[in-house]
Amino acid sequence: MNILKILRSKEIASGEAIGEILGISRAAAHKQINALKQIGYKIKSSSKGYVLVNDKNLFNEYEIESKLKEPLKICKTVKYYKQLPSTQTAVKKLAQNGFEEGVIVVCEKQTSGYGRIKRAWSSNAGGLWFSILLKPSIRPDEASKLALLLSVALNRTLRKYKVDSEIKWPNDVLVNGKKIAGIIIEMSAEQDRINWVVAGVGVNVNNKLPKELADISVSLKEVLGGELDRAEFLTELLAKFEDIYSDFYDNGFEIFAREYNRNIAYKNKIVAIDDGYNIVSGVNLGVDKDGRLIVGCKIGLKKIISGTLRLRKK
């Protein structure tokens, strides 16, 4: 339990009581209280103890850790920054320096955020931008499935908020046909083993989108008509992904293929997929048990491992 959970669970908490729960001295508890005040928490002090007055709209590592309902293997350490070039770049550096699985880097604003094929990603304040360090014991050719699994976790989380969403293979989530979230998977691997994977996720939550993206992107604030608690949304998403990640280890992707296909965008529509070398056009028939996109072409079925999918205009 951290200090915020204690303050939220009690009308008033004395320094001694906080110290006993956390196993620290009263002076150390007072020091932590002052640290919280310095980053924006309103905490009243009296002879009886401390009262948390208001913490609305605050977003930082304390909020994230305090809203985790249980310890997660994929979220052992949270590092929060006001601004970074990219959370992906930050976590890749940590991976290269030998950090273990379960480090999450979150930032308020990215100045050089990017998605697949290094496409720029608008990452203004108010959104949810984070990357996770993973070290899965899977073959390198299976790493792309992690993007599909994160898509399922995002879809489940959005449904909890009563938001109908669709998964656009291989790494986007759409609401009302517009992009609300994107995923990127990068890794270091040898021929037969993965050294590390960095999974990056960007979700348009409360951020204001540039005018030039209004026709293709949307935020949760627009959809729901009000701001969301980003720490709560993130911890819900992480908990769902942890369950999915564990099941994937035990049973593979096949158990998620049916759920993925129930929620896939452009099902039975004519699409075009650019794999970087060729463009394949045909009917989107969903994914198979290995996460490959099945496309019905004139010459038969094609199974595509990766690429950029677009709805083909008639």
Image (cartoon, rainbow, N blue to C red):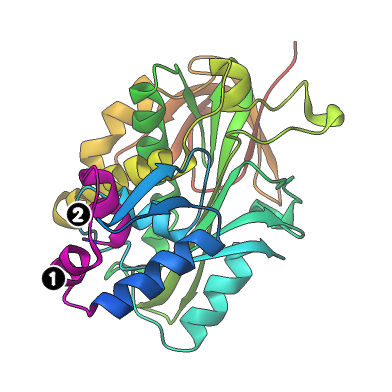
Which mark identifies residue 20? 1
Q: Quarter of the image holding residue 226?
A: top right
Q: Quarter of the image holding residue 155?
A: top left
Q: Secondary structure at mark 1?
A: helix
Marks 2 and 1 sit apart, C-alpha to C-alpha, by 35 Å
Q: Earlier in the sequence, mark 2 or mark 1?
A: 1
The magenta stretch is 2-25
Name the residue type under label 2: Ser
The residue closer to the viewer here, 133 or 230, is 230
Q: How many numbered marks are there?
A: 2
Classify 267 as above or below 253: above
Quarter of the figure with the C terminus? top right
Mainly helix, strand or loop, the magenta region?
Answer: helix
Quarter of the figure with the N terminus? bottom left
The residue closer to the viewer here, 23 or 196, is 23
Residue at horizontal 75 percent and vertical 32 percent from the top: 209
Classify 2 as above or below 123: below
Q: Is residue 11 magenta?
A: yes
Relative side of 295 to 90, left or right:
left
Q: Position of residue 160 (x, y in %)?
A: 33, 24
The residue closer to the viewer here, 78 or 12, is 12
Residue at horizontal 30 percent and vertical 68 percent from the top: 76
Q: Secondary structure at mark 2?
A: helix
Which mark identifies residue 246? 2
Q: Is residue 195 magenta?
A: no
